[in-house]
Image (spheres, rainbow, N blue to C red):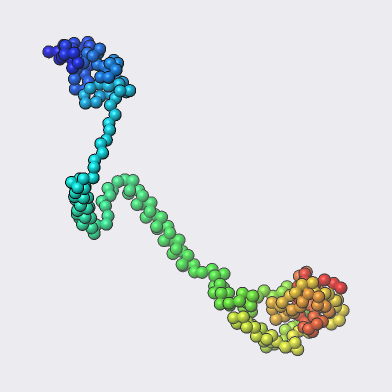
Amino acid sequence: MNPNCARCGKIVYPTEKVNCLDKFWHKACFHCETCKMTLNMKNYKGYEKKPYCNAHYPKQSFTMVADTPENLRLKQQSELQSQVRYKEEFEKNKGKGFSVVADTPELQRIKKTQDQISNIKYHEEFEKSRMGPSGGEGLEPERRESPDSSSYRRPQEQQQPHHIPTSAPVYQQPQQQPVAQSYGGYKEPAAPVSMQRSAPGGGGKRYRAVYDYSAADEDEVSFQDGDTIVNVQQIDDGWMYGTVERTGDTGMLPANYVEAI
């Protein structure tokens, strides 16, 4: 049995039937309620089971609700119910602290990778601890003990001796000569001038200091800019041996701190 059209009420045959909005329509009867424009299944919009075009589709509007005492009471009651449910859920999940995670292949792969990284780091730390600290690390605490970095002096056994060629004269150091040391900025007096090594025989040259220099070792001499150095002999390319005329101290001095007169 053929149904009737929702608009004109006449029988709708299959060749002209449009089944939409839970109703049957003739193709010509399926048009906009406002402008009567014929619609199809692609451009219609339904509102309350009636077809409309895009231009005349009814727009929904919101109504203002006054804050009456009854509405305020309902609002407060709904908020209380929400808080009660929140507390109930909180008490149920309290103490759990974790959520169940499915043991998927991807999670298993990530876990395996993390275990491998952890093992590699463990072996690296183990190898470092077994090898112990390097030689340079042991010297740092001794360097930090001195509050004044300028007064720090290297231990006697770690100082590199000056290179003295075989052709130059070798000067013997007196036995049991005291070594000047510094402790926390206080510098003990060095050996007397009489205990220092004497300059080699005559034939030395005269030089003038062009920079200030402070002795870094007991076999060196300190001088100031403008001091005259007498009886100077060349030891190697970087060091000389001579006597400071102003102080009378004799010892080694850097060659790039003086110039010939």
- Is 125 or 82 nearer to us in this picture? 82
Q: Residue at x 27, y 57 (%)?
A: 97
Please tell me whether residue 166 is drawn above or below residue 78 in the rendered image.
below
Residue 27 pos. (x, y %): 24, 13
Residue 164 visible to an observer of this rendering: no
Q: Residue at x 25, y 36 (%)?
A: 63
In which quadrant will I find the N terminus?
Answer: top left
- Is 149 or 6 nearer to us in this picture? 6
Residue 187 pos. (x, y %): 64, 83
Please tell me whether residue 101 is drawn above or below residue 11 in the rendered image.
below
Please tell me whether residue 126 is drawn above or below residue 47 in the rendered image.
below
Please tell me whether residue 18 is drawn above or below residue 226 in the rendered image.
above
Residue 98 is left or right of residue 209, and the answer is left
Toward which corner of the image does residue 38 lie, by quadrant? top left
Residue 7 visible to an observer of this rendering: yes
Residue 112 pos. (x, y %): 35, 52
Q: Residue at x 74, y 83 (%)?
A: 172
Toward which corner of the image does residue 94 lie, by quadrant? bottom left
Q: Residue at x 79, y 84 (%)?
A: 248
Residue 96 is left or right of residue 184, and the answer is left
Toward which corner of the image does residue 246 lie, by quadrant? bottom right
